[in-house]
Structure formats: structure tokens, C-alpha cells
Amino acid sequence: MFRAPVFRGAVMSSGVLGIGVSGLLAFQRALGVTGNNIANSATEGYSRQRIDLSTQIPQFAGNGYFGSGVQVSGVHRIFDQFVETQLRNSTSASEQYALYYDFARRVDNLLADPDSGLAPGLQQFFAAVQDVANDPTSNAARQVLISEAESLVDRFSFLNQRLEEQRNLVNGQIQTTVAEINSLAEAIADLNKDIVAALGRGGGAPPNDLLDQRDRLVLQLSELVSVNTIEQDDGALNVFIGNGQNLVLGNRATVLVADGLGPDPTQMQVGYVSPGATVDITPYMTGGRLGALLDLRTSVLDVAQNSMGRTAVGLAQAFNDQHRLGMDLNGALGEEFFRVPVPQVIPGAANTASGAPTVSIEDYTRLTVNDYRLRFDGSLWQLRREPGGQLLGTVDPTDPPEDQVIEVDGLRLDISTITLPADPLDASGDTYLIRPTRNGAQQIDTLITDTRRVAAATPEMLAAAGGGNTGEASVLSVGITDASGLTDLSPVTVTVIDNAGTLEFVIDGDVVATFDLLNPTTEINYNGWQLVIEGEPAVGDNFQVSFTTAAVGDNRNALALAGLQDQRLMADGTATLEATYNTLVAEVGTRTRQAEIAARAQVKLLDEARAQRESISGVNLDEEAANLLRYQQAYQAAAQVISVTNSLFDTLINAVRR
């Protein structure tokens, strides 16, 4: 009966010892967690960790349950998924607008430069044309005109080359960015594997440091492209880009490629490597640096080169049309002053059809800055405007060749020059990329180098009735209608003959008009000129048509050429040549300004998102210092409990010895 109290005292002492030991171990780990937080206070992407303590299962001692100490139930990181997602989105948007603004600013400075821009070149060129009009006899003025034309052509070429350099730089950065995306995707997949394994070994305890590393990699990935994430039940994180293409699934990463996947092999596209094929996902890539590069190429570089090319085509065609109406110092009709650029047609690399559509510019005043894509769907050719994909027309390849034509935006496309394979279905998906003005600034050139061939004068046509005419017909008017149809300036004789009772007008035996009693006015159109005769002629009557060649002091065509500067020749007659370029400068400037404003706004939003994350997951050294002191004191108190337990044992042992 005497030993029973001793036994109960031993149980009580060992219980107190267990409580003290549990507290000692728990607060030792708490000090370790706090110390780890302090050590990683400057580590990028580190999430503050917190130890979770809980009471151990109490023991029943006959007269109640007595606590048995404390235990560590886990260590978790202070983390908010919503805030982390917001940070990723802000990072992606900030990187996108910052890079877009950087490139757009370069293009804007290039196009708007008062010295190297196109606007000063156009003004100087037309000023030189006006100088020729002021003194058409001056050989020096004519030489200055040719020199200014060559300078203008060089300016077109220079600007186009600089834009090509920016395009090559963008393509290079697209390749680099895609390679970085692949590297990060592989690293995330590896971490997924490690995290799943760690969760299994730890019985579901989260490997916080590995999770932080993975989140840091996903954040770096969001700098390159917009991402969406979904966490699996096993702890792996699936990463998606574009409109749902999986980049990382568990421990497997998908490979992206940057290559010339479209008709233009120099245009880098982003491809998604899937079993058996590489799918072009370029249209779906948004956000981050990759989204900025792709958007910049479409909305700035393509528009700038197409717009400059359209101006070059309009200038060359309009100036040539008017120049051919004139006459040079040699007494010859004006020739083409500029080389007119031609549309570019690029067939798809995988096309099975042979040949290509014949594309010509029929009306330069209606040209747009768009590209076009012709695609065969297995039964019909479909023409769509790019970008946007608006359907503009279809052609049935079984129709007669003369019906296989599409006319749109001043262009004429003859599809009959494409030869389909024996089974047309084999050509399903064949495409042709049509760029009417992309190479315009590169192709325009000056064709006239001889000052005497500048057609400043206007040839005059003279027409008179033959002196021996017996009819009542007289010349009402005569003039040039199409200079391109004039073959020479030799005199022409129009003779009236009787053909079975019908009076006909003939030139060199060819019938050019028939007299109608109901309409006494007869129009004779021949080789680019028109003669109007009024009244009824008689058989044998003739009319002489000739051209003046004394053009030394004539400036009328030069005045007409100078007047092209102010004529609304472009955009369906709504804009001058210079206005089309100024519109381009204004559009690029507007986009640049918008990008600058958006970039600044996104920087603020990103700073706020980072601050919000830091307020939740960041390490507060003051708070950690307080925790360190608190856990230290608790550790010391637990050690004191063990010391008290030791004293209790000593007391019990001494009591038993007595």
C-alpha cells in the first residue's frame, strides 16, 4: 500500500517530462521555421512559412483527462492563389506593353523623322517638278528633278530596309522567347515530378520550398506569354497557354517551335508539336513578350510596310499615267518615269496545286494596306482579307477560265492560272498569300536618267477636213484619251467609204467608226486619241489628224505632274499621296502613345500586385523578430519544465530511500 503513491508520482513525473520534451522539440522547430523565414527574407519568390502546433492526445488518469503536451501538426506557407494569379496576369501585361512600346517607339521615330522620313522627300520631289514647270527649258531643273526622284526612291528603300531590320529582330526574339518557354516548361515539369514524390514521402505534407520554386518559374513564364494553371489532386500543376493548349501536363512538357510555318518562310510562326504534326498556334499567343512581338509585327510592321508600299505604287502609277500624256524634248511621247511595283504572291510550302494566281493592280486608288489569303477548300477557292479573315469572294475551278476572276480593292485575281491535281480533294488546304503592296517601297525605281526625256510638254492634236471634201461633216474636237495607246506621232488620215450603202470611216483600211443618220455626231477612237466629227460626210471625204512636236517651251504637262501632289488619288479619292503617309505616321504614333500609357499603367498595377503579394506572403522582419523572441522564451520555459521534472524525480528518489 505504501508503494502506490510512489508509482503514481512516477507516472506524473514522466508525464511532465513528456510535456516538457514535446514543448522543447516543438519550439525548436518553430525557431527553425522562424530562422528560415529570416534567412530567406531577400529570396525572390519565397513565401513566408508558419508552423502549426496542436495539443497531443490527452491521457485519462481516473479523475479526468490531463494534457500530454504539444505536437507539430505541419508547416505551411502563407500563400494566396488568387493574389498569385493576379501577379502573373499583371506581369504578363506589363512585359507585353513595355516591349511593344519599345519597338513601336523605334518605328515611330523612324517614320516621323523630319530628315529621313518620307514626307520631306515627297515635298522636295514635287518642288523639283514645279521648278521644271516654272522653266521647262532649263536642263538644270530637269536634272534636279531626276536627282530628287532618285533620292525619293532611295528614301523609300532606306525606310523599308530599316523596317526589315526591325522585322528580323522581332523574328529573332520570337525564336529566343520560344526557346525560353520550352526551357521553363521543362523545369516546371521536373518540379512537378519532385513535388508529387515529396508529397508521397511526406504523407501529404507540402514541400513548401519546391512549391515556391515552381511558382517562381510560372511567374517567369508569365513574362513570356499569358498562362493559366490548374493544380491536380496529386499536387502537380498543369500549365496552359493560348486558347487552352497544354504546355505542361504533370511531369510532361510540350515542345513549341518557332519556324516559318506559313507561306512566308521568313515569317516566324509559333508551332505546337503534337504527335504526327506541328500545329500553327500563332493567332492564339497573347500576353508577355511573345504576345507583344506577334502583335507588333501585325499591327505596326506589316501596316507600315504595306502603307509605304501603297504610297509607292500610287506615286509610280499616277506619275507614269500623267507623264505618258506629255511629250519630251525629242518630240516623243512621255515614257514610264518610275518602275511600278507588282504584287507579291507566295504559294504555300505544302501546296499540291501547280502554278499561282495572276494578280494585277487595276485601280491603284482603291488599294488598301491589307494582305489577302487565297485558300482551296476542296471545291472552291476562297479569298479572304488578312488580318481578320473576311470572305471577299469565291471561285469555282470548274468554271470557264474567263469566269475564274475575282476583282476586289483595286486588284484583279485570275485563278485560272492555277492547275489542280487530278483529284481536287488532294489540293484541299492549298493556300496563296497575296501581298499587293508589301514590297512596293523596295521595288519602286527611277527609269528615266536623260533630262531630254522628261515629258514636260503636252502634245497637241490637230485635225482638219480635207480641202476637197464635198460632205457637210466638220471636225468638232480632237484629243488624247489614253497616252499608253499612242504608238507614234505620225500623221493619220481618216477616209470615208461606202460599204453597201453604209458610210464608214477607215484608217489604213481598218474601219474605225460608222456614220449613223440618227446621230450626226461620230466619235472615232483610235490608238489612244479621239476625233469627233459633226455632220454627214460624203464618200471620199477625208480628215487629217496630226501632232505638234514643238515642245521646248511648253510646261502644261509639268504643271499637271506638279498638281498630282494635291490631288486626292488614294483611298478611293479621299487622300493625297502625302496624306496616306501622314496617316501612317499618325497611326503608328497613336499606337505608340497608347502603348506608352498602357505600359506606365501596367507598371503601377504590377507594383500593386507585388505589394499585395508581399503583404501576404512576404517576410516581415519585425514580426519574425517578435516570433523569434516568443519561441525562444517558450523553448526556455519548456527546458525549465524538464528541469522541474528532474527535481521531482530527485525528491521522489530521496523519499523512497528514507
Image (tube, helix red, strand yellow):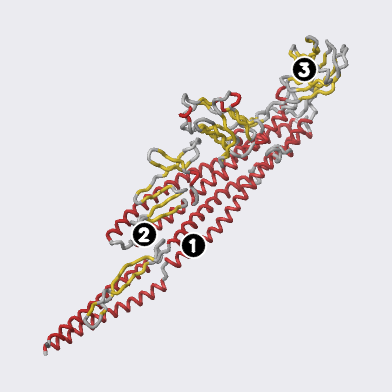
Residue under the image location 44 percent in, 67 percent down:
616
Q: Which residue is mark 1?
A: 609
Q: CA distance from mark 3 to mark 2?
A: 91 Å
As drawn, 84 above or below 514? below
Q: Could you tell me if residue 549 is visible in this image?
A: yes
As drawn, 299 above or below 25? above
Query: Reading the chain from its start, which is encountered first: label 3 or label 1?
Result: 3
Q: Which residue is mark 3?
A: 513
Query: Reading the chain from its start, which is encountered first: label 3 or label 2?
Result: 2
Which disc is residue 442 wearing? none
Q: CA distance from mark 2 to mark 1?
A: 20 Å
Q: Quadrant of residue 323?
A: top right
Residue 525 location (% of width, % of height): 76, 21
Residue under the image location 32 percent in, 77 percent down:
632
Residue type of the residue flagged with mark 2: Leu
Which of labels 3 and 1 is toward the front?
Answer: 3
Helix, strand or loop at label 2? It is: helix
Q: Quadrant of residue 216?
A: bottom left
Say whether residue 515 is left or right of residue 46. Answer: right
Q: Which residue is mark 2?
A: 211
Residue toward you, 609 or 503: 503
